[in-house]
Each structure stands twice: as C-alpha cells, then as structure tokens.
C-alpha cells in the first residue's frame, strides 16, 4: 500500500509516534546520526597550520581542498598535473601498495601511452624529489615516504600527517562526547573538524575514479559532521543562533531532510512555529516537483508535532530522555 501523500499529513498518527516527534522539539532532545562515509553555512575556513607531525617528518598532507603539502616553510603544491594525480592516488591509498596498472589508469585513463610504465617511474622520481624538498633533513637520512614494492608503490604516512585522518579523529572524539552528553565539547570537536576544510576535497582532481570516489565520500562525511555539530548546538540551547545557518543549508541542499528537520526544530523552539510549518510545506513541494515523492516519515511526524504543540501532549515537551 502506498504511503500517505504529503497533503494528508494531518491524518492521525499513533500517539507514540507523535510523542517522539514532539520530543525533537524539546531542548533536551538529541538524535545522534549514524556513522557514515563550500559555503559559509558549512563553517569552512582556512586550514590549520602545521601541527601534530613528528619533527622528523616536517610536513603535512592536505587533501580537504586543493591538494598541497605543508612544510615549515609553508604550503607547497605540485605544479605538474600527472605528478599531482600520482600523489593524490597514493594519499587516498596511504600505507597501501597501489599497483602499476591502477596508477596508469588514474593518470591517463583509457588513453595510456606505450611508455606508461616508464613514465610512472619518472613521475615517482619527481614526486620523491618534491617531497624531499618538503621533508628536509629526514629525507637526507634516507626516510623518504614513497616506497617501492614489487607490484607498485606505497606512500607511508604517520599519525597526524594527513588532514583527512585528523578530520576523522576529531569527528570520532565529537561523537564520543555527544554520546556521553557533553554537547559543548562535541560541538567544539565537530567545529575543529570542519575547520580543516579549505574547499572541495582534492579540488580539481576528481576526473579520475579513485580521486572522485574519495571526494564523494569526503563530502558526505563533511555534511554528516555539519549535522552532528548542529545537533550538539541544538542540545545546548543555541536554536536561535542556528536559524540563519540552517536556512542557508536547506537552500543549498534542498533534498537533505536532516537540515530541514533541524531548521524546523530550531524555529519551533524559538516560538516561530508557523515558520517551521512553512519550511515543511516548501520541502514537500520540492520533493514532489523534483522526485515525485513526499518527505520521509521523520519529517512528517515533526510537522504533525508542530500542529499539535498546543494540544494536551504539549506538557510532555522536554520531559523525556533522548533516544540513542
């Protein structure tokens, strides 16, 4: 049987369903999104300076934006496109051997020259020279990060040397704080993670499979982090200051229901219930126009809860424990 249409959202829903939606409107509610995989609304800012790297390495790889290597002398970019692509692939597969066949596929695609294998060896030599200049004294002691293996090459990295790894660590710390009810600390971790982003991941290099797959995963992970930070901020009563940011996110990502849900919650807690209901109606029209579908059940339940916030169920707002 087909689910009810959006236009019939006023039909009766079970009381437990309404109660869960009403809880979302309360200040104490916190719903932690599941673990996954460029606008001002996302809180992007310049990448952090070199930190968290052992002295002998003296460099940091940054993938959350255009690809670059940061040394004590500042950021450096590879100017040769094929060498840059080589570095990107080795970083995405850090500490793993990347076969020669995969390297040639990433660098040239289907139009590989006859001398592709020999050319890869040349590019690896150029990459080693570039990284040696960034690595300084450690390279002079024979500790270059690009390792030759029988089937290909591998790039060795250390903890804290790659910005995307730091991003994942910060998000993990934030989730831990959130699960323990330390929402201010969680928000700080999520904010620090988002602060590592300088633009789209591997900006300008996503025309090859490995880089494109990484960039898709990274962008989804970033949006999940934004949602997590907003959830934490809602949990500590920052609903009023979140409204402008969430409006921008809903406008930029009109099919991402999580941001619409958070905006409806923020508006409802700010005593702007009519605007919250209007958000749902606009999302509903967008879904119908672009997908021929209606919003998911959680958003419908929240809309129904907005309609009933002055009913006899209203005293239950903010009295129930969060669901994990």
Image: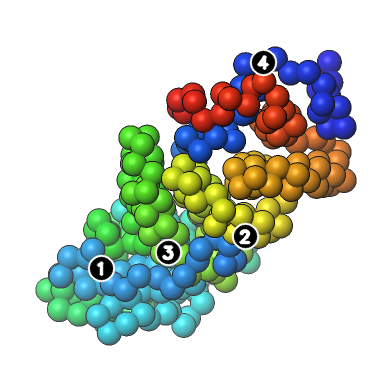
Q: In the rendered image, which quarter contains the C terminus?
A: top left
Q: Are marks 4 and 1 in contact (CB under 8 Å)?
A: no
Badge 4 marks a residue whose secondary structure is: helix
**Residue 249 screen position, x and y as percent:** 64, 56
Image point (38%, 59%), residue name: 192
| Near-viewer residue (30 or 92) | 30
Which color scheme is applied? rainbow
Q: Between tags 4 and 1, which lies in front?
A: 4
Measured Cα–Cα span from mark 1 to mark 2:
33 Å
Q: Which mark is residue 195?
A: 3
Count of marks, rendered view: 4
Marks 3/1 in contact by CB < 8 Å: the verdict is: no
Left or right of residue 224, residue 192 in this image: left
Residue 60 vertical position relative to residue 160 in the rendered view, above or below: below
N-term mark: 3 or 1:
1
- Label 4 and label 1: CA atoms lie apart by 52 Å
Residue at 65% across, 45% down: 271
Q: Earlier in the sequence, mark 2 or mark 4?
A: 4
**Point 15% across, 70% down: residue:** 55
Are there few (<14), some (14-19), or many (20+) residues within 10 Å of tag 2? Answer: few
Percent across and percent down for residue 321 are: 45, 25
Disc 2/disc 3 C-alpha distance (Å): 19 Å
Circle on res. 15: 4
SS for callout 1: loop
- Say which residue label 1 marks: 51
Crowd band around label 1 with a 10 angstrom C-alpha radius: few (<14), some (14–19), many (20+): some
């Amino acid at each position: 049987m087909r689910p009810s249409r959006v236009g019939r959202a006023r039909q009766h829903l079970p009381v437990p369903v309404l109660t869960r939606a009403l809880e979302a409107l309360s200040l104490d509610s916190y719903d932690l999104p599941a673990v996954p995989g460029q606008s001002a609304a996302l809180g992007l800012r310049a990448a952090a300076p070199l930190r968290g790297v052992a002295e002998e390495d003296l460099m940091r790889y940054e993938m959350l934006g255009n690809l670059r290597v940061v040394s004590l002398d500042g950021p450096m970019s590879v100017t040769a496109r094929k060498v840059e692509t080589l570095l990107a692939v080795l970083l995405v597969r850090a500490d793993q051997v990347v076969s020669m066949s995969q390297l040639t596929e990433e660098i040239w695609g289907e139009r590989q020259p006859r001398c592709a294998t020999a050319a890869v060896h040349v590019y690896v030599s150029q990459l080693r020279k570039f990284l040696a200049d960034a690595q300084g004294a450690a390279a002079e002691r024979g500790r270059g990060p690009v390792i030759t293996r029988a089937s290909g090459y591998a790039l060795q990295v250390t903890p804290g040397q790659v910005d995307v790894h730091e991003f994942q660590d910060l998000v993990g710390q934030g989730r831990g704080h959130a699960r323990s009810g330390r929402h201010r600390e969680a928000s700080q971790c999520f904010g620090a993670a988002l602060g590592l982003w300088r633009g789209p991941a591997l900006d300008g290099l996503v025309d090859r499979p490995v880089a494109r797959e990484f960039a898709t995963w990274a962008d989804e992970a970033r949006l999940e982090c934004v949602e997590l930070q907003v959830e934490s901020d809602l949990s500590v009563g920052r609903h009023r200051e979140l409204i402008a940011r969430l409006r921008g996110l809903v406008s930029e990502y009109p099919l991402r229901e999580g941001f619409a849900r958070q905006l409806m919650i923020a508006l409802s807690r700010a005593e702007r219930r009519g605007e919250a209901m209007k958000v749902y109606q606009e999302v509903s029209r967008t879904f119908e126009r672009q997908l021929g579908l209606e919003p998911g059940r959680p958003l419908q339940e929240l809309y129904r809860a907005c309609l009933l916030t002055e009913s006899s169920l209203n005293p239950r707002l903010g009295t129930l424990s969060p669901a994990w």
